[in-house]
Every structure is written in C-alpha cells, then in structure tokens.
Image (spheres, rainbow, N blue to C red):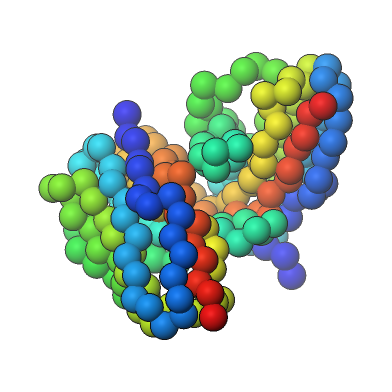
C-alpha cells in the first residue's frame, strides 16, 4: 500500500528566497508523481507531472525531481513570490488497474511574505 | 466556463440527516472521482466512475452512495450523516486514457453538527 509523506508541514519564507519541498513515498513501483497546488476555497491545480521513466520536470520557476530508488521527490521553487503562497500536495499514481487512484501526501503549507 | 463544478459549496446539516452533493464536468471526460479531505488535510479517494460504471471503490461506509446519471455528472449521496463525515469533498474528472491527469472541482465543505 502506497503511503506518501510530505516535509515540512508548513514553511514560511521571505519573498525572493529559493525553497525546496519534500515528498517521500513507500512503494517505488510508482507510475508517475504529481505536484499540485491548492488555494483556500479552491480545488487542486496540477503543477508538474513526472513519469516513472523521467527524473525531473520544469515549468517556469518550478522544478520537480523524482528518485524512485530512494522513494523521494522534491519541488524546487526559485525566487519565491507572495503569490506562491498555497498548500502544495504531491501525489503518486500506482498504474495498472489503479491508474486513476492518486495517493496524496498531507501537504506543505507555504507562506511567502513580502 | 467552469470545468468541474460542485454544488453546494457549503453544507451544514445535523447528524442523522441525508444529503447529496452534486458534481458536473463540461470537459467531455469519461471518468469522474470523489475525494474526501479531512481536518488533517489528507486527501483520499473514495470512488471512481468510468462511463457510469464504478471502477474504484475504496473502504467507504455504505452510507455513501455515488450516482452517475450520465458521463458528465457524478453525485454523492450520504445517508445518516455522522460527525466524522465533516470534511471537504472534492470531485474530479479525467480522460479515460489519462486517468492521472485529473481536474478538480472547488470542493464542498460539509459540516455535520
């Protein structure tokens, strides 16, 4: 059974700082891993998707890496801005007959203050 | 223009009542999901429907019954509500051939008193 853990639970940084959010998973037979952003009162928005054959994905100031052997993924945010403040969730997908079953971590609440 | 919509946004009700949450998607997707996010922010899948057929059914009390009248709708009916049912419920949808690429609704905050 896949379990996903995120560290830290909360992070507060000044604007402009580079930061790293961590995600670990127990089952290395992961099909893909995603990072989502959740804003208060809104649904989840997918930020980056890393397939099992890939090691990283980049979108703008965001870079996500995946290391299946160690069961870890990181989300790197460069030059953070107040608009980045949100909850960030990682989710693993097992594939096979469970293609649609995403297993989420509990999230990291990020606050970027001016 | 809303891709995945849920109604109501907030629902406050008493223990023992029966309530429904509605979900609609206009993305033309074949698969729809219900997730529960508890007070500790853990988001867990409850059900998944593909072309009106149940394909994922996690360990959820049988007081919860999903109903899919057509591909664009997946409603969640909850009988005999309990305090522990208080949570935010999210609906999501995806294409059948890309089930990991899910689009989420804004959530319904259910409070049982």
In the depicted structure, whether residue B79 falls above or below residue B75 = above
Question: Can the viewer see residue A88 in this picture?
Answer: no
Q: In the image, A32: left or right of B17?
A: left
Quarter of the image where the C terminus of chain A is located: bottom right
x and y, in percent, of residue A10 in the image: 46, 55
Which residue is located at x 42 percent, y 45 percent? A105
Q: How many marks?
A: 0
Give the image location of residue A9, x and y in percent. 43, 50
For this view, does B15 lie left or right of residue B76? Answer: right
Along the line of sight, the residue nearer the viewer: B27 or A80:
A80
Above or below residue B107? Residue A84 is below
Please tell me which residue is depicted at 50% across the width and 57% down the height of the picture. Answer: A109
**A50 or B70: nearer the viewer:** A50
- In the rendered image, which quarter is residue B67 located in? top right
| Residue lying farthest to the left in this orientation | A69
Q: Which residue is at a point 55% across and 38% down the rendered structure image? A: B40
| Location of residue A47 by image quarter | bottom left
Find residue B26 and report its horizontal and vertical position in percent.
Answer: 69, 60
Q: Nearer the viewer, residue A13 or B19?
A: A13
Q: Is residue A48 above or below residue A91?
A: below
Task: Say which residue appears at 74% left-offset and 70% top-offset.
Answer: B1
Residue B50: percent from left, percent from top = 56, 40
Quadrant for the N terminus of chain A in the image: top left
Q: Is residue A76 at all visible to an observer of this figure?
A: yes
On screen, residue A67 versus residue A61, left or right, reads left
Task: Judge left or right: residue B2 versus residue A3.
Answer: right
Q: Is residue A93 above or below residue B19?
A: below
């Amino acid at each position: 059974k896949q379990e996903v853990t995120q560290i830290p639970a909360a992070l507060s940084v000044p604007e402009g700082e580079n930061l790293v959010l961590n995600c670990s998973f127990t089952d290395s037979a992961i099909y893909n891993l995603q990072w989502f952003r959740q804003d208060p009162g809104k649904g989840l928005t997918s930020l980056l998707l890393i397939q099992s054959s890939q090691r990283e994905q980049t979108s703008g100031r965001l870079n996500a890496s995946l290391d299946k052997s160690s069961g870890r993924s990181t989300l790197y945010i460069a030059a953070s801005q107040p608009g980045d403040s949100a909850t960030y969730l990682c989710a693993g997908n097992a594939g096979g007959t469970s293609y649609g079953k995403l297993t989420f971590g509990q999230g990291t609440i990020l606050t970027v203050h001016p | 223009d809303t891709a995945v919509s849920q109604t109501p946004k907030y629902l406050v009700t008493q223990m023992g009542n029966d309530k429904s949450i509605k979900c609609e998607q206009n993305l033309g997707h074949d698969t729809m999901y219900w997730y529960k996010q508890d007070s500790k922010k853990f988001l867990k899948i409850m059900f998944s429907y593909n072309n009106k057929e149940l394909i994922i059914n996690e360990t959820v009390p049988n007081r919860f019954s999903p109903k899919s009248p057509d591909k664009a709708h997946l409603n969640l009916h909850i009988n005999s509500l309990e305090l522990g049912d208080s949570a935010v419920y999210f609906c999501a949808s995806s294409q059948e051939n890309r089930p990991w690429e899910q689009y989420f609704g804004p959530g319904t905050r259910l409070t049982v008193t």
